[in-house]
Amino acid sequence: MKQSAVYILASKKNGTLYIGVTSNLVKRIYEHKNHAVEGFSNQYDVTMLVWFEIYDTMEAAISREKVVKRWNRSWKIELIEGKNFDWKDLYEEIL
């Protein structure tokens, strides 16, 4: 299902974070989990979906991604733990 989304991946609880934006969340997380894409998340094994937000438009998602990327780490952790205190992998929930 196509849907514009901003997401945060983690390598583990309080581990390395990756923030991304996509028009197809399920497909994009699958690609991260299966190391189908070269880059930061593949290099650092950042594959756990720990937070996401869905948007009506890609423009809104990109705008939000830019804001969250500028935040300091502690704010990002607060964002994650506000919805996912235990840092559970949310991938199964979006399937």
Image: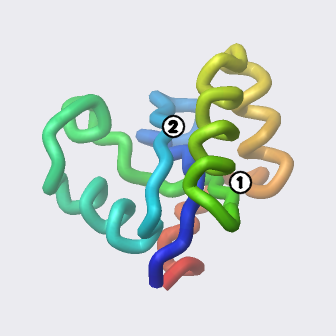
| Amino acid tagged 2 | Ile
Residue 63 falls in image quadrant: top right
Residue displayed at 71% across by 19% down? 71
Q: Nearer the viewer, residue 46 or 12?
A: 46
Q: Nearer the viewer, mark 1 or mark 2?
A: 2
User: Which residue is label 1 attached to?
Assistant: 86
Estimate the x, y position of residue 88 in percent, counting from the top left: 61, 60
Of the numbered discs 1 and 2, the one sitting upstream in the chain is 2
Estimate the x, y position of residue 57 in percent, counting from the top left: 63, 61
Estimate the x, y position of residue 42 in percent, counting from the top left: 22, 40
Residue displayed at 68% across by 30% down? 68
69 lies left or right of 31:
right
Residue displayed at 50% across by 32% down? 17
54 lies left or right of 25:
right
Estimate the x, y position of residue 60 in percent, counting from the top left: 68, 49
Residue 30 falls in image quadrant: bottom left
On screen, 8 above or below 71?
below
73 lies left or right of 44:
right
Q: Secondary structure at mark 2?
A: strand
| Residue at mark 1 to residue at mark 2: CA–CA distance | 18 Å
User: Which residue is label 2 attached to?
Assistant: 19
Task: For the residues labelled 1 and 2, say whether their Cβ atoms are less than 8 Å apart.
Answer: no
On screen, 55 above or below 6?
below
Q: How many marks?
A: 2
Q: Residues within 10 Å of mark 1 (few under 14, many from 20)?
A: few
Residue displayed at 42% across by 69% down? 24
On screen, 40 above or below 88?
above
Instruction: Say the numbered circle drawn on residue 22.
Output: none
On screen, 28 above or below 45?
below
Q: Secondary structure at mark 1?
A: loop
Q: Residues within 10 Å of mark 2 (few under 14, many from 20)?
A: some
| Amino acid tagged 1 | Asp
